[in-house]
Image (tube, coloured by chain):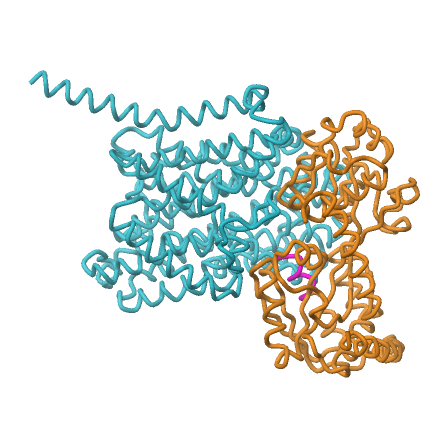
Chain colours: A cyan, B orange
Amino acid sequence: MFEGIMTGLATAFTFTNIMMVIGGCLIGTFIGMLPGLGPMSIIAIMIPVAITIGDPSTALILLAGVYYGAVFGGSTSSILINAPGVASTVATSFDGYPLARSGQAGKALTVAAISSFAGGSIGAILLMIFAPMLASVALLFHSSEYFALMVVGLSAIAAFAGTGQVAKALLMTFLGLIMATVGEGVLFNMPRFTMGIMDLQSGFGFITLAMAMFALPEAIYLVLDPGRSKTGDGEDGGKITNLRITRQEAKSIAPVIGRQSLQGFFIGVLPGAGATIASFLGYAVERNIAPKEEQEQFGKGAIKGIAAPESANNAACTGSFVPLLTLGIPGSGTTAILLGALIALNVSPGPRLMVDEPQIFWAVIISMYLGNLVLLILNLPLIPYIAKVLAVPRNFLIPFILFFTLMGAYIGQNNATELLLLVGFGICATILRFADYPLAPLLIGFILGPLLENNFSRAMQLYDGMGFIWSRPMTLGLLIFAVILVVLPSYRARRARARAEGVADGD
Amino acid sequence: MTRMNVTRRVMMAATAAALSFGGQAALAADQVVDSIHFLIPGGAGGGWDGTARGTGEALTKAGLVGSASYENMSGGGGGKAIGYLIENADSQHGTMMVNSTPIVIRSLTGVFPQNFRDLTLVAGTIGDYAALVVPADSDIQDLSGLIEAFKADPNGVAVGGGSVPGGMDHLVAAMVMEAAGADPIAMKYVPYDGGGATMAGLLSGEVQAVSTGFSEAVELAKAGEVRIIGVTADERVDAYPDAPTMKEQGNDTSFVNWRGFFAAPGLPEDKLAAYQAALEAMYATPEWSEVRDRNGWVDIHNNGDDFRVFLEGQEQTIGDLMKKLGFL
């Protein structure tokens, strides 16, 4: 193995390759900040460039740089303007944006950068050690387990169900699940709930809905309530440079990063689960195990709430390379595109890759590590400048947010109907926000809905009914875990309330 | 009907033009068309998108076409772009729309009201065969093994695929069953979200066989993880000659998932001939070989009239089968 690592290192540390990784990271970061362009489309754009290079290792190093750059860029738009362009950074905006709004954008970005780096690096190390062993684990999961895993993911809504919010959060989740059923599903030949409108055939777009739930209401809110955002007035501009995190903060997020890197990596290994569910689960789990006083901070700008999804989604990205490299199965859209690139470069991923072409296998892993490292080195000094976006006076900032929101919804599909949907949903979402309904559960329901439904129907079909719940112990175990995640917080809250009342009685 | 006759004459002219241009292309490609605007009925990054951009890249780099532009117009499973091309036919003479097998399936199921006859057929350019695949360690060795296992216990053999029920992968598996005298309606078809998820389902043992694109199966077959028990080509495919065809196993199934180009109805003959000549000449260029190999495509060229005959045949086969399966 060390021989392989040395070969990989020797390949990676040439002048060309280091320039490639730096270039890739920069391109990825800047394009990734645009809400409409996620890692998948950026890599698709870069593939012809990478293939022209010819040498598989160099090409992969470039693509890995672009990939990690794009993932990091996506977090940046989530944190700064509440516009998550990729499903896996939705959870980052829950705490990242509130923190940025309170004038600590620099800190939020720093925590995100460090967590991403740690998640990606720990992931790469785990990949190095466990890849061959994990190949078989990836195949243990059947549709019924994926269904149960999605149920666990939905239990993340419990994280938003603060006092008295449980019913509202559940309601919004169901609304999201309902919206996910619009269009032609994977399992049904017929379009559902499209009301004969052709543009609804493929359902609502994720980016459209994400912008409508988060970014657009934010912009409208800023207009309606000028006193709300202090950071937009330019006077806090100086404070943004304050990107240091204190020793105490570092100490508090370290275990979070450790746990979520591990958890995220193992979820990422499962083909079809991926970074999104890893980030939601990471967020939910960390909130549930946090001490009570910190729990209240989640959703209001807790740095743990940034560290958890960021380390989890980066570790999961790395984890998704396990089925790709060891079985040749792409577990996500991005790895599917990378698989195409590998094949075009005459590399056939599969069990024989490690034996036949160890230098490529190790070059991929080393390049992932290098991509993460360069990203951290490049971005930490850039953060103050990136964060300055928020120091832009509000009357310039609002059009800026609106522009990127509208562009993001349009750019992927080139379909003007998306813009109408965006504005319509954006207005509805603003009203819901005024009524104090949490919008995140709606988006989580929408994202996980199709996965939940498809896996459920597959399991039903394969077992001719609900039998899979009893005949597959792992499914049952996951479902029980989900119930615990939902029930535990409200049980704790009730007990705390009862105790408080008890004290009052005692007085 | 009159239009069809006109089209036929156009095709002949085009073929003649194509042959002469094809000869020249081997020496130095002359520019055949000034510019082409590619209309892509789906979003960026999909199969249609890749086909249009790859073709445009090869055409422009080889100097056959001066410049290429691209427009993504998703919506309605491709129906929006088709409607747009027909409604604005007069102003869209510079446009070629990419499409593939789903245009046949979706017009049959009524996803959109138009069908390929409402457009000018330029050419089918590339394609992929379909294949039935089992895990390498499966007891099922060949096609007859699968059919026997299915006949013995229809419920115990689930066949996975990357399309909706009634979609391409399902139809191919059903065609094979029917040709073997088994009941395609009794087959348990399990749909997955795309080829990668289908293969994961197969290797996890959840389904016993899958119906998928041949090129998608080849890599895993080379890696020794799966066995291709039948490919829907008429003869063994060079990319992986170890895979037997359906036909050599006595199963009369032949299927090509094609991709090709369409133009607005009423396109002037000279324009059409030029487009067809450019595509024809493209095959001989090194630029095309590079794009094609990078994407793992197979040249399956059906020009003009051949394309229409092919599409009508495919529509007939698929339509009959869908009626039988109860999807129509």
Give the dominant element type of the magenta stretch: helix, strand or loop: helix
Percent position of residue A293, x then y = 25, 32
Extreme residue toward the top, this view: A506
Q: Nearer the viewer, residue B225 or B158?
A: B158
The vertical placement of B272 against B318, above or below, is below
- Locate residue B122 relative to residue A59 in the image: left or right: right
Quadrant in the picture for residue B120: bottom right
Magenta-drawn stretch contains A84: no
What residue sits 29% from the left and 60% below the top? Answer: A220
Q: Nearer the viewer, residue A184 or A273?
A: A184
Asked if residue B49 can be seen in this view, the reply is: yes
Quadrant in the picture for residue B23: bottom right
Percent position of residue A131, x then y = 64, 34
The vertical placement of B69 against A318, above or below, is below
Asked if residue A120 can be seen in this view, the reply is: no
- Number of callouts: 0
Magenta span: B46-53
- Locate residue A66 relative to residue A301 in the image: left or right: right
